[in-house]
Image: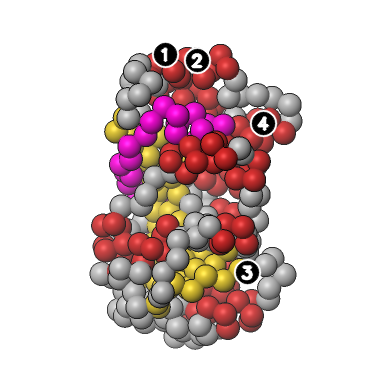
Amino acid sequence: MRDKENKMAALSEKEAEAYLDARPRYPVDWYKKIAARTQDHKFAWDVGTGNGQAAIGLIEHYENVVATDINEAQLKRAIKHSRINYHHTPKNMSEDEMVALIGGENSIDLIVAAQAVHFFDLTTFYNVAKRVLRKEGGLIAIWVYNDIIISPEIDPIMKRLVDSTLPFRTPIMNLAFDSYKTLSFPFEGIGMGSEGKPVTLDIPHKLSLKGFIGFLRSWQPAMKAKEQGVELVNEDLINKFEEAWGDENQVKDVFYKAHMIVGKIPVSIQHGSEM
């Protein structure tokens, strides 16, 4: 379900650590607000779990979490917890197998896809989601972050870098760059974004210069350009960022811009007219 290259494999150990340091942690109040809107709190499904960050956030509000990913290497690094069940879901897994693995029809109170849904085969994912999500009181939440606000000195340099990635972006990347405004989302809104109209949120984070440069080197659009022989994150650009950063040991308070949509099974499907 998740067609994502393991970009971590292409990084040195130090770069991989810096990349993880630069990744923001999703605010705990997101899980709290969404969980408050689900009827029950028995089972949640974290799809495209990666290192398990969202699964750990969900376990504070749900009795059990099923966390799945197509990438076995990522799952081996995932954060362990006694009430989180991690499962590898290879691309050749059928919809029926997926439904059975997750918990069966009408079994999941909340589905979360954090920084992940744009990698999915959406037809398969939405078919499975509609089957496993509780018809009454179940919710599905998706979100993506696609921009970072650091400082008036750094932000214009970052914007030029973002603009330079345009020729190298894939359709998958563009879904993320477009803030999920062009992503199909066949679920009924509950006042927390809807198809074509995600809500915009801030994710606060503390970022070091080392972490920022590591993030840029591992950034998927830059890596895609590098595959085509173009080094967007070159020494000249890094020097500009270092100069704009100031004290290289300073850890800055930054904000990632995130975009979220939360929905429920449409009434027509709840009543069986589309099944």
Identify which amino acid the numbered label 4 is placed on. Answer: Ala
Q: Which mark is residue 239?
A: 2
Q: Nearer the viewer, mark 4 or mark 2?
A: 2
Dot 2 or dot 3: first in sequence order is 3
Q: Does any portion of residue 264 appear in the rendered image? A: no
SS class of the residue under badge 4?
helix
Q: Position of residue 150 (x, y in %)?
A: 35, 28
Residue highlighted by disc 4: 225
Of labels 4 and 1, the one closer to you: 1
Residue that appears at 61% across and 68% down = 88
Q: Quadrant of residue 69?
A: bottom right
Q: Residues within 10 Å of mark 1 (few under 14, many from 20)?
A: few
Q: Is residue 46 above or below residue 226?
A: below
In the picture provided, is 256 more to the left or to the right than 6?
left
Label drawn at residue 243: 1
For marks 4 and 2 on the same chain, the one whose residue lies earlier in the sequence: 4
Dividing the picture into quarters, in which one does residue 48 lie?
bottom right
Which range is magenta?
Answer: 194-217
Q: Return the residue nearer the eye: 170 or 41.
A: 41
Spot occupied by residue 4 in the image (x, y as percentages of width and height): 63, 52
**Helix, strand, or loop for circle 2?**
helix
Q: Classify residue 63 as left or right of residue 127.
A: left
Helix, strand or loop at label 1? It is helix
